[in-house]
Image: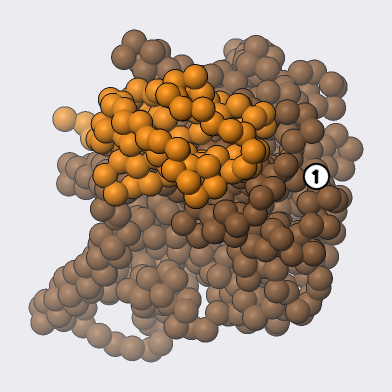
Chain colours: A orange, B brown
Amino acid sequence: MKFSSKKIIIIFLICFTLSSIWLSYKSERILDLNYEKNWWSTYFIEPKSESLSFIIENHSDKESFEIEIFSKKDKLGEINIEIKKGDMKIIKEEDFEFKIEKNDRITFKISSDLEIREIYKNL
Amino acid sequence: MLNFFYSQILLYLSFLIILFIPGYFLLLVIFGKNESPISKLERFILSFGLSFSIVNFIAFLYSKSNISITAFSSILGIIIFSLVCFAFYFIFKKKNVENLSPEKLFNFSKNQFFLILTLLILSIFIRTAYLSGTVAPTSTDMGHHMYWVKEMVEKNKLPVYEGMPDFIIGEHIVIGKMAMINKMSVFSAFPVIFLFLINIIGILTVFILTLRIFKNKNIAIFSLIFLGVIFAVSSPQAKFISGGVMGNILGNFLIPLAFYFYFRAFENIGNLESEFHLNKKNGQKFLSLAILTTFTLFYTHHLSAFIFIFIFALLIPFFLLVNYKNISKIFKEGLGYFFSFPVIITLLTGLIFFFFIFTPNYIETNAVETAVGAPSKATREGLSFNTLKSSVGESRMALGLIGLFLLILSYKKNNFGFAIIFSWTIAILIMSTKPNLLFINLPSSRIGNYLSYPLAILCAYGLYSIFNLKTINIKNLNLKINLNNLILEKFNRSIFIIIFIFVLASGLIDTSRAFKSSPDFSPLIETFEASKYLLEKNEKEDVILKDHNYVVGDSWMKLFFMQGYKYPQSRGYFKRYFDPTKPREMCTLHMISTPVGEEALECFSETKTNYLVVNPLYDGSQFKKLKNFDSVYQSEGVAIYYRK
């Protein structure tokens, strides 16, 4: 058996290729919004206007979300919703069963387990 | 799944086209195919470095001729270059045949073969294991570099860097052209894989350089242990790959490559008895390639080029000094190499490119002047020996210094390679510990990182020499030791085992410390998703400010907007705002830290900033109190405030 450098090159190329396939696979997983991720976010659909429609995007293992709506410090009402991992829910102004007077800070306090997010607009 | 395999095929195709084919054909036309002075393994390794050079120079020509740099034009340029090389090879191939036997040095015994394979596999495996947890696009440096790569890909021309001297064109051309061909996102693993390959090829370059210098396969194999396996993660290895420290990784590839060519050029200068004698023509060819690689280094990384100049400035006088008895012969032969058609043509072409076709931005700005002079900061006043020791690894430092001592003891004055290794080590040692002696005004720790490469070679030489004291020419010291003495041999063997275990253990402990326990990438994804939100809602008049202190992966945000390197604005590390030597821009600090303060109000009106991206845990409370800020986006690690 001849132990030439040609064999070293071939084995090096095989190892490097396998390694980079693995790294590419890992990278795809890392950039996947849901794979081994645990986060959720909420945001207004129109950040600049007076529209109060917003989205909750869930990439966590939690599925129950409680939304409390405040005008200044007064609680106007609350909604409970379910969102599966990888899904999002649009909450439109017209979905609320109560009227929101747009004359002060309107805060949406969204909680799931012990985690809380707050988005608000000063109208 | 199909997309994944398709992208993988394109990835390897881009590596082949950009990083292998041009160099392979250049070597083909220069040295022919068979019976050439380079072995198959060398041809394989050198093809990467030379391709890197050629692809850069083709891009400079395109830039000067206003030809768009696209995937098609890049491939076309390489095809034309390779065809021209092949045509010349085909026409002149008979003349290229020389009766040389380089493969002898590259035929390994069964044990050596399996040891090389094991070390290579280990080198790749350790790095892969580390990079698996760090391949995510989080590092600040990588984010900065990928901005320019993306700009090149999107605008189909070379980036101009907005006058910033810290970015050098050679860092981005090759990876940019590859991205055009493989269509992979710069957020993917592709940049890391590119640097990984460069790192491994750099290690293999050191392997062939060591093999050529010492003509000893075992020393070369040991160099693989000290550079590839031990301290495989610490700087400047895998940590620099994931950290996107492109200049350093590329510099540590091009410096040994240039030394390889210089060594091959002057391998036999004043040494006609050598068994591996090359003719004058081959010396000239190697010198041409050395000059080409040197120009590439100057186009790729200023710090590496700067270090290379100092090494060279020590190398030439040192080699001449130790060979002073032979100096006229060396001069005569050296000038014979230099004043030859291939060398003069390469040098002139390089100079024309450098000064008239594409001048690196660090030459055009004042970067060179700022690197020379008395150290301006404490971090530039030189490292203590202890700091340097911990930077390159205590055991590697110790064994490397033993290697240096043994190299001096057994110094072969007409071996140009010995002079290279000596100057490489000593120049970096002085530059990093006593920069004031050389009027260097650069961060000492960055220079110190370059020491690990020559030290690895010295470690290999030291370890081998301790084990084989017969190889040391100790008659220089008038010592008489009976080397056949059985006790001495057993003693040597014991020392070898103890030292080897010590170095191996400390090197691997260092590696194991660097592994992270499966990190959570949710905060990174939050930043990217927030960036996408802003990109969607962002209008022409909007101005964004983000925080670099507490937002994960924030330096990658600019890649979503592509509205300039400095967009979005960034609140940098707090210490940067308090510089006693010069006034600093403060608006980015005020607008986030004290948004209601007078300075901040002035800054808001001046900069028109209306979106602020911060971590709500650290910077949410100051905005919550204010009526002119809406909280429009929130996740755990990112909040976006809109200023009305």
Q: Work out which quarter of the rendered image holds the C terminus of chain B and state it.
A: top right
Three-letter code, disc 1: Lys
Residue A22 spot, x, y in % from top left: 30, 31
Quadrant in the picture for the N terminus of chain B: top left
What number of labels is visible?
1
Tell me: residue B13, above or below residue B583.
Answer: above
Report the residue at 62% width, 34% height from top: A102
Q: Quadrant of residue B104?
A: top left
Residue B45: image x %, image y %? Answer: 46, 37
**Residue at the spot of label 1:** B608
Q: Nearer the viewer, residue B110 or B563?
A: B563
In the rendered view, does B124 fall on the left or right side of A109?
left
* Any part of residue B271 in sight: no
- Identify the residue at horizontal 17%, vertical 75% (top origin): B498
Q: Residues within 10 Å of mark 1 (few under 14, many from 20)?
A: some
Q: Is residue B265 above or below residue B408?
A: above
Relative to residue A15, is residue B328 drawn left or right?
right
Looking at the rendered structure, the secondary structure element under dot 1 is loop
| Percent x, y of residue B382 | 60, 80
B466 left or right, relative to B424: left
- Is any part of residue B543 visible from this angle? yes
Q: Position of residue B63 (x, y in %)?
A: 80, 27
> Would you identify the image quadrant in which residue B499 lies?
bottom left
